[in-house]
Image (tube, grey):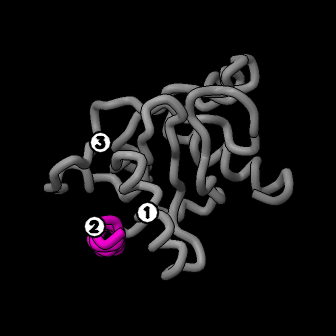
């Protein structure tokens, strides 16, 4: 993500779903690991894929799109989370994919912060509200699975 203005927009966009956006921004700054818990289902849901499939799916999306929506990676758990439109989790049917929506909380790193923590952005949010289209994500997952089974 280039520029402090883009980072500021991304922080504001993410914090807007917090019960207290001001407290959220303050916590991001004060915590050594640079993460906060944010509620899913308000501004976005998250589809969490196993690491190998998630990285392969992201590679497919990057070949097809100028920019997918925000994508998270967990360092320890080997998982990749795609931010998708709210309500997607309630409609998602898929083996091995964890759908996180309304009523759940997600560990979210502060955009623009590059060090530490168990979570990081593979594709940081740009602050515009761009999310990954779940239909395109499903197609990319199928192509990624095909590529993984061939390899």
| Measured Cα–Cα span from mark 2 to mark 1 | 11 Å
Question: In the depicted view, which residue is nearer to us: 85 or 98?
Answer: 98
Left or right: residue 38 compared with residue 53: right
* Mark 2 nearby-residue class (10 Å; few <14, some 14–19, many ≥20): few
Determine the residue located farthest toward the right in the rendered image.
3
Q: Nearer the viewer, residue 71 or 95?
A: 95
Q: Residue at x 49, y 26 (%)?
A: 37
Label 3 and label 1: CA atoms lie apart by 23 Å
Instruction: Tell me the SS state at disc 1.
Output: helix
Q: Name the residue under label 3.
A: 101
Closer to the chain start, of discs 2 and 1, is 1
Quadrant of residue 62 within the rendered picture = bottom right
Residue 107 locus on image (x, y percent) = 49, 30
Q: Which x, y percent locates residue 111?
A: 69, 43
Q: Residue 28's image quarter?
A: top right
Q: Residues within 10 Å of mark 1 (few under 14, many from 20)?
A: some
Secondary structure mostly seen in magenta is helix
Residue 64 lies, in percent from the top left, at 49, 82
Q: Do the residues labelled 2 and 1 touch (CB within 8 Å)?
A: no
Q: Mark 2 falls on what kind of element?
A: helix
- Cα gap from disc 3 to disc 2, whole angstroms: 30 Å
Q: Name the residue under label 1.
A: 56
Q: Percent from the top left, x then y, of residue 33?
A: 67, 22
Q: Is residue 59 or residue 25 the one in the foreground?
A: 59
Image: magenta residue range: 134-151
User: In the picture provided, is 4 more to the left or to the right than 121?
Assistant: right
Q: Mark 2 points at which residue?
A: 149
The vertical placement of 20 against 150, above or below, is above
């Amino acid at each position: 993500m280039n520029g402090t203005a883009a980072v500021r927009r991304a922080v504001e966009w993410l914090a807007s779903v917090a019960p207290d956006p001001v407290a959220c921004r303050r916590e991001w700054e004060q915590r050594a690991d640079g993460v906060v818990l944010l509620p899913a289902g308000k501004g976005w849901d998250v589809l969490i894929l196993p690491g190998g499939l998630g990285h392969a799916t992201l590679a497919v999306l990057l070949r097809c799109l100028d920019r997918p929506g925000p994508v998270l990676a967990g360092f320890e758990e080997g998982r990749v989370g795609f931010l998708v439109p709210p309500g997607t989790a309630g409609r998602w049917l898929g083996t091995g994919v964890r759908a996180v929506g309304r009523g759940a909380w997600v560990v979210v790193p502060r955009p623009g912060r590059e060090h530490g923590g168990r979570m990081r952005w593979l594709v940081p949010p740009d602050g515009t509200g761009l999310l990954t289209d779940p239909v395109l994500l499903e197609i990319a997952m199928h192509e990624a699975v095909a590529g993984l089974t061939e390899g």
